[in-house]
Amino acid sequence: MSSYKRAKLPPTFQWQERALETVLRCQDKEVLRVVPLNRGWLVEVLVLDSAGNRPTFIPTSKEAGTWWGARWAKDRIEHLESITRLAVQ
């Protein structure tokens, strides 16, 4: 069994476990979610990245999806904090 360790994110980011999904929030705004899809999982990015993209990813497990989501967010911390800061003002 593989072990996925999520990237460490600043305190402005929090993971929220829900009944069927896991959501990554930044400053109380949903950034991405890991949801079941048929017999697998789907990572949906809910905001546009700095290139104007909203990527999706099909991981092999929920843990792999949260690992990918944390890496994706860590590589974009400054951008995500700035757009979510504007959204909550």
Image (cartoon, rainbow, N blue to C red):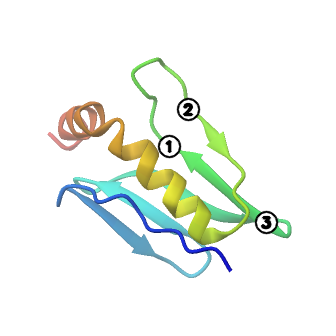
Q: Residue at x 22, y 40 (%)?
A: 81
Q: Nearer the viewer, residue 56 or 46?
A: 56
Q: Secondary structure at mark 2?
A: loop
In the image, 37 versus 75, the foreground residue is 75
Mark 3 vs mark 2, foreground winner is 3
| Nearest to the observer: residue 65 or residue 1 | 1
Q: Which mark is residue 54?
A: 2
Name the side, left or right, on which 39 lies relative to 84: right
Look at the picture and state if 37 lies above or below 68.
Answer: below
Check disc 3 and report the residue beneath it. Answer: 40
Residue 46: horizontal and vertical position, in percent? 50, 43
Which residue in the structure is indicated by mark 1? 46
Please report contact status of discs 2 and 1: CB closer than 8 Å, yes or no.
yes
Q: Position of residue 26 (x, y in %)?
A: 28, 52
> What label sits on residue 37 in the rendered view?
none
Query: Residue shown at 36%/58% (left/top)?
Result: 7
Q: Earlier in the sequence, mark 3 or mark 2?
A: 3
Q: Estimate the x, y position of residue 58 in percent, counting from the top left.
A: 72, 51
Task: Identify whether 51 is placed above or below 34.
Answer: above
Q: Position of residue 54 (x, y in %)?
A: 55, 32
